[in-house]
Amino acid sequence: MSLNHLIDLADMDREEVSALVGLAGWLRTSPQPQALAGKILGLVFFNPSLRTLASTQAGMARLGGTSFVITPGQGTWQLESRLGVRMDGACAEHVREGLPVLASFCDVLGIRSFAAGVDLARDLADADFRAMASVIPTPLVNLESAIAHPMQGLADWRTLDDLGIAPRSRFVLSWVTHPRALPLAVPATTVHMAALRGHEVVVLRPDGYALPPEVMDRARVAAAASGGSVSETSDRQAALAGASVVYAKEWGSPVHYGQPAAEAALRATLDDWQVDETWFAGARADCRFMHCLPVRRNVAVADAVLDGTRSVVLAEANNRLWTQMAVLYRLLRG
Amino acid sequence: MSLNHLIDLADMDREEVSALVGLAGWLRTSPQPQALAGKILGLVFFNPSLRTLASTQAGMARLGGTSFVITPGQGTWQLESRLGVRMDGACAEHVREGLPVLASFCDVLGIRSFAAGVDLARDLADADFRAMASVIPTPLVNLESAIAHPMQGLADWRTLDDLGIAPRSRFVLSWVTHPRALPLAVPATTVHMAALRGHEVVVLRPDGYALPPEVMDRARVAAAASGGSVSETSDRQAALAGASVVYAKEWGSPVHYGQPAAEAALRATLDDWQVDETWFAGARADCRFMHCLPVRRNVAVADAVLDGTRSVVLAEANNRLWTQMAVLYRLLRG
Amino acid sequence: MSLNHLIDLADMDREEVSALVGLAGWLRTSPQPQALAGKILGLVFFNPSLRTLASTQAGMARLGGTSFVITPGQGTWQLESRLGVRMDGACAEHVREGLPVLASFCDVLGIRSFAAGVDLARDLADADFRAMASVIPTPLVNLESAIAHPMQGLADWRTLDDLGIAPRSRFVLSWVTHPRALPLAVPATTVHMAALRGHEVVVLRPDGYALPPEVMDRARVAAAASGGSVSETSDRQAALAGASVVYAKEWGSPVHYGQPAAEAALRATLDDWQVDETWFAGARADCRFMHCLPVRRNVAVADAVLDGTRSVVLAEANNRLWTQMAVLYRLLRG
């Protein structure tokens, strides 16, 4: 949380994250209905949302504040983010004007802007989001950028705490399939969150879907400081043995980044990467199933798992509310 | 109002409806600006809205609460509602996750989800809406489903009370034409509301547009208990004789349900089903014109009627505000 | 501000405008967080918005009130505004019902409805907006109509006051190019605002882009009463000599109104109407650059000017907040 911008969990240390998660728990049991009275949250959604849109507005309201929503390309014109271009195309305004203007109307800005999905290095550096952040002088919350979804990571940590899942236990982040190549923000955040929490993190994925070394190396550094570990494998049985958590997530192959046809060809052979009850044969009996949602039923995960007792996806989603309230509270009240 | 879900006026008895209408009148004259302070209304619109969107948000604000809006397919991805399907199509999330998550962020949920218009029996049973309701543990308000629009029914009852229109008077629900086959929710609710209020209800419609027996039979039971009656006819002159109210509404032919071409062919001969001043020749001199809006001028009703002194459409619409406030007040304060 | 409708700065005299601008300054330094507690602003956007949407909602919230947003054609069906038509097309509802209904839910309505761009005389008379206003009994704020954008004019006046730019100084409104023919609302409002403030107003534009005589004549009357003047020229060097302000704006040729192809052909030769630093050679050293935003970088104005110290576009945009709060405060508290 450099300055007053919360962009990536990887910018924070274990104590900062843990304190936010603790604050979320306190706000859940100790309502503070006037804490942010008179404060305004501006929300900018370059991409669709369900949980984030609803929970940030509801969270702000529960603290006494209000919010407004801007959706470029829908109700608001499209915004340009490239520098130096002649703007004679579809975009009527540049983020260099649009975002500072919106920031000047409110007390804190939240922005969702998914990966462009063309240049892996650029997306790994979160170059577009950080360029936008550089023109925003006010507090800023990342509501999912090219490579980071810190609000999801905080909610998942809160959920692991709520469930009493021990830091040293095995946390398996498993790739699952999807009709399209999805961004890396959630898997990158999840592996980092679990490493920072001190888990024995195993990234289970088919060949061609290894997370980029930048993501894995950063997570290993976090794990080392927290007493955890980070490994990866394509051996499902080995990965799942003794697991306390299976966290399923869809993402596109980094090998074919920005090449949808090649990516789809590789993925076409991987339909069996759908979590069903057989996956839990070697796991702990009380192994939990996690997913950030939205999830495609019977593609990424079978109905029986989602509707069964292992699934904690609704608890994760509900914790978005409390952890985001903690972030807003911290940014606006210090 | 079984449990804390208000889905259909037909689930309520006369006293319950009358009490809500009375509460609406009280809220109109006795502002309660802090009654729902800190409470949050979540709104989910699977279909477009003008009155409902504005009046629920305004009503919640007038009681001190706040609201957020989710629009699947626009700002939020499309939601799947079928059970057991492999979700490899356009829908990124299932209502079984999406709706409980949204409910967990707020104190009361309002949902609009029009008829699929394919399977009449399914729509008459309100199967899709009730499936959604089954996964929502919190208070729920139906903002128009396949077969019910209880908020409209309450507002219309409030309007009839305001105008001093006696329960035993003749209430004519007349079919009028429209460029498309519209759903049955409003006519089904209207005939039930008027029957429950004790009117001499006449459903006036051309051949092929009789309301389904399930709707008519249920209304007859309600009428019997309230001292009213329900009949139907295609004889315009007979229907309108002595009418105190002409309530115009467009709906598709149940005979050709889910068959747009056949329905359009039948409807093509019915352009004279447009209410104009000649319709009132045999009615009471003070006969009122009602419509739930939106209405297509000079298709369903002539300008002269809408702009004339008979029309109470703006009063009906305004009563949406007060009756919805009553529902929210009742659901959240008991 | 005839009655309680603020439609056009040209309806107000210098003292009324100046008082609103002063009230905006007072609200900026003296927060009134409960001034409009319990009040509701209804917003209707027939056209896209960024600043107006965010600043009206934020402004209402800063005064303790709330707001709702209706977007015809998106979330709400399209609204018809023509009188007497048979509504068998795309529009499901007429503004004669829709707008009074929305007004009845709230305390003040704000409407954005751009020029139809077909009939110049009709747009100059603001016929569509004034027809809508005629059915709205409650307070109304014009958020940009065919020919007027009073909220922009007030914010710009506030900005000129903030910068200490003297009323008699030279204010150059310059045409700049754009990929499309844009409406006349902002240039018409800007020339009037600057005239009313008492500037030596020069409208700089290429041949074919003279503002209509109705606009210029009205501004000249305002200038005469304020001690200013209004002239026009296509001579850039002459116009800019000694300028204290260059206010850039895109608009379509009134000569080819409603004729996009002919307009585009004329405009195709005018790419050098892009403000860059050379424009300021003969201006005062402290000459400011103004633009209402959104602006297309390197089409209407060069990056170097927007990113340089002359540019006050962010200050103008921020003043939208305070001047709109002043308007809402005045309309709702007198």
Image (spheres, coloured by chain):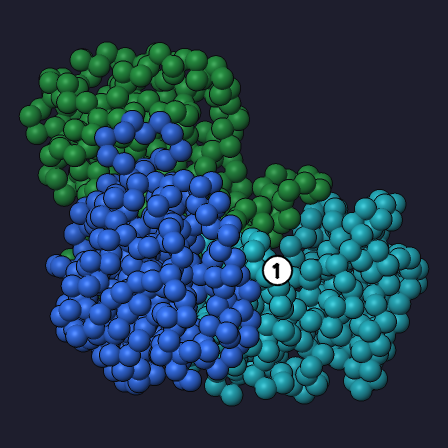
Chain colours: A cyan, B green, C blue
In the picture shown, does residue C184 fall above or below B162? below
Q: Quadrant of residue A286?
A: bottom right
| Residue positioned 19% across, 69% down in the render | C223
| Front residue of this view, candidates C256 and A124 | C256
Q: Amino acid at mark 1?
A: Leu
> Which percent across, then down, holds residue B29?
15, 57
**Which image quadrant: the N terminus of chain A?**
bottom right
| Residue A299 seen in render | yes
| Residue B327 seen in render | no
> Which percent across, then down, holds residue B33?
25, 66
Residue on which disc 1 sits: A314
> Which percent across, then down, holds residue C253?
38, 49
In the picture shown, does residue A209 fall above or below A137? above
Left or right, C106 with respect to A20, comes to left
- Total marks placed: 1
Residue at mark 1: chain: A
| Front residue of this view, candidates C140 and C253 | C253
| Residue positioned 38% across, 14% down in the render | B268
| Front residue of this view, candidates A45 and B292 | A45
SS of the residue under disc 1? helix
| Front residue of this view, candidates B14 and B111 | B111
Of all residues shown, which one is farthest toward the left? Answer: B285
Left or right, B16 with respect to B92, comes to left
In the picture shown, does residue C186 fall above or below C237? above
| Residue positioned 85% across, 45% down in the render | A265
| Residue positioned 63% across, 40% down in the render | B83
Left or right, B73 with respect to B329, comes to right
> Which percent across, then down, holds residue B274?
26, 21
